[in-house]
Image: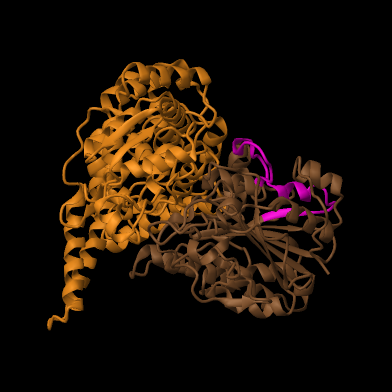
Amino acid sequence: MRHDPTRRAFLTRAAALGCSAAASPFMTPIAMASAPGENRLVVIILRGALDGLDALRPMGDPHFAALRPSLSEGGTPLGDGFFALHPELSGLAPLWQSGELAFVPATSTPYRDKRSHFDGQDLLEAGIAGDAALARDGWLNRALTLMPGSTARTAFALGRERMLILDGAAPITHWQPGTKLELGPQARLLLDYLFIQDPLFTEAGLTALEMGSAPGMADAPRGPAGEVLARYLAEQMRAETRIASLSLSGFDTHQSQKNRLRPALRNLQTTLLTLRAELGPLWARTTVLAMTEFGRTARENGTGGTDHGTGGAMLLAGGALNGGRMIGGWPGLSEAELYAGRDLMPLRDVRAYAAWALRDMFSLRASDLGQLVFPGLDMGDTPGLLL
Amino acid sequence: MSRPASLGMIRFGLGLRPEGRGGDGAALMADLDRADPPGAITPFATRLDRAASRAALRRAQREGSMVDTQDKREAINQAEAQDSLSDLRNTVARGVAAPIGFRERLADFWANHFSADSRGGHFRFARAGYIEDALRPHLVGNFATLLRAAVTHPVMQGYLNQNVSVGPFSLVGRRSGRGVNENLARELLELHTLGVGYSQADVTQMARLLTGMTFDLDQGYKFDPRIAEPGLIEIFGKRYGGRPVMEHHVFDALDDLALRPETAAHLAGKLARYFISDSPDPQLVAHMQASYLASGGDLRVLYRAMLEHPAAWGPELRKTRAPMHWMVASLRATGVTPDQIGALSDRETRRDLRAPLQAMGAAWEFVPSPAGYDDSARAWITAQAMAARITWAMGLAERLPQTPDPRDFVTRAMGDMASPQLARAAGGAETRGQGVGIILSSPDFNRC
């Protein structure tokens, strides 16, 4: 794996491969950075627009059952029982009880009304409020520029089971870095020279040439994608990595949501539980933020799914979290309380929570966060994310 | 080969061939009318038949038939998988055989524009048949015809859930309480036509109008009045539909979308970005847009407008070859013949074509999203993908029956477009094979 001295694009479009209607790419990039201190931050992008109302069900809201006739059964009640976890997230309930899990039930980016995955994800990752076409770099990347001594890099984890799904039953000889890319030193030297001539190819080409000897990459371990990712990531976080981002997909559930959301939520739960287990005592210094590009319609559609909406839930986890609570209030689900009569009303900008997490964990200045990292953001009062 | 000719082969075609001809503007336009050799790709009708057979066998099993249908189903699935490998071989071979390949590149462009695959639905491996039957016959005609063929195809309808969308006030809707699914309507506006300039309300209206379009496994695409939302539906100030709503009402709306200026700008910009540059000359795009609109949506006119504009012929190569394009270009340059590709066994096809394409980020029969692949120059050039390209190029170069001298091969592969650095590096390799592999892996050869 190549440790590049230059700051690499963090959380940008290049790391994304579009709408989760078509499932995740078989290679999942993880962006990682070292930074001063012992605190650790993981940002998980849930691609495809997670239905917050299904992941975290407002059972106590009088309008919920009517809006979701086929999507409100079961679940694990949290605290006073107003909210219940989706059955596939029930493994997270112990974290709630120990204060290591919290939700912001009604939040969103400033993106409104267009409901395009691609623009929504661009804005979420860029952390800006305006035109998605203006998205140039990611907010985590800009945050890194404020941390002296930080360096960033990208790793590529192979999700083997995704490859098998693509291939059907027939096994194929997999390309694996390190096993086939056997270049003589001269060929390596010449390619190195050529890749340096062309800036577009320099980083990818040189990294490709070094991947052969990358630790942990030659034998992609088997297992569910989230588990493989989380195990790899935890290993990096036990070493120098302090900030990381990765994306999970499969959340775009226009139909048969009851069945189709389950694997994606299971994957999210596995990722969180694996991270926690693998980090051991370091979990106490770790905060995980899971966010999505926008929520989904409050009403079920005619095909047992939900369509692109506005407000949705954000998940927070970690040993340092002041958790076991809902953050930021609940707008309600009556017709008048919905955004445009159709979507959950977001009560606060999701970027504010990310900004407060960065401030609390890495002591970044509020003025820098509001101007450089999230231009134009009003951070508002502290939500008191950490203990 | 003169400069515009090799530039045209690289930028608008599939790259140079040893016995190659020129790729100037006139040659490129002539390439559009080359007939597709028949029988290369498994027709969609075959996929449809097999889906129907599978469904019938499942039904028989469920209803307690005494005969075990497992073997029959497995035989069908095996035929599906084998045909998919044959489709892949033939697609690669067709690219290698193409004199220029402009037509092949356009087929790729439109296949990505009308992005759809068939995983998880009724059909297995039906994307190639969808492209062959719905898109390739209409590459040169009117965009409205292409649009209609794409949007009505069962693969697209299944991919974007149109087949489960029901007008709530239709016969079926009133009886069953089923409703509208907006997926196809949204992508129709955002991705297939306008790109910008529509609202959520327009999506909702369009989705209502599209109800009625669906497919079944007996006849494929069909318009079913029993699920069509009755009444007049207003979209962009014009009313469509009626009682009863008819198929041509939907087609009228598609035809009107095809001719909107937003659509013209979207298509012109995307085509110029695909072939020429991530940020093409605005005058070039404006010229393409105006020509398209003036011609009533004629794609041939759109292509000609691109090729006749001087900004399309800037000397610097600003785009990068997509995995399939790069693979085909490598095979063309090294003189591998279409027959040699056609003779690959299924196992070799998986190892030498399908697995590498997947490692390069463009798995066969797969699309990443309704928006297709990101076609910016940077998108394909990741470390993972470059490692896969280097590995494949070195493997190909080692296995050539007669490895050319890398110093000659630079010209054979790049015409006069190779950088002096590449020519120097090619001469410095340890072996001929490594020299050829280095040229194929180089930034020069990965650009177009």
Evaluate whether residue B26 shows in this view: yes
Q: Measuring 63% from the left and 38% from the top, which residue is drawn there?
A: A199
Q: Measuring 20% from the left and 63% from the top, which residue is drawn there?
A: B79
Q: Measuring 67% from the left and 81% from the top, which residue is drawn there?
A: A94
Q: Tell me if residue A105 comes above or below residue B163 in the rendering.
A: below
Give how far across and how far down residue A21 sits, in percent.
44, 55
Name the side, left or right, on which B304 lies relative to A138: left
Foreground pick, B220 / B359: B220
Q: Tell me if residue B23 comes above or below residue B398 in the rendering.
A: above
Foreground pick, B430 / A323: A323
Task: Determine the colour of chain A.
Answer: brown
Task: Determine the colour of chain B.
Answer: orange
Instruction: Assess whether residue A137 is covered by the magenta stretch.
Output: yes
Give how far across and how far down residue B125 sits, in percent.
29, 57
Give how far across and how far down residue B439 sits, in percent.
48, 41
Foreground pick, B50 / B279: B50
Evaluate whether residue B329 shows in this view: no
Q: Quadrant of the N terminus of chain B?
A: top left
Magenta highlight range: A126-153
Q: Tell me if residue A49 comes above or below residue B318 in the rendering.
A: below
Instruction: Assess whether residue A331 is covered by the magenta stretch.
Output: no
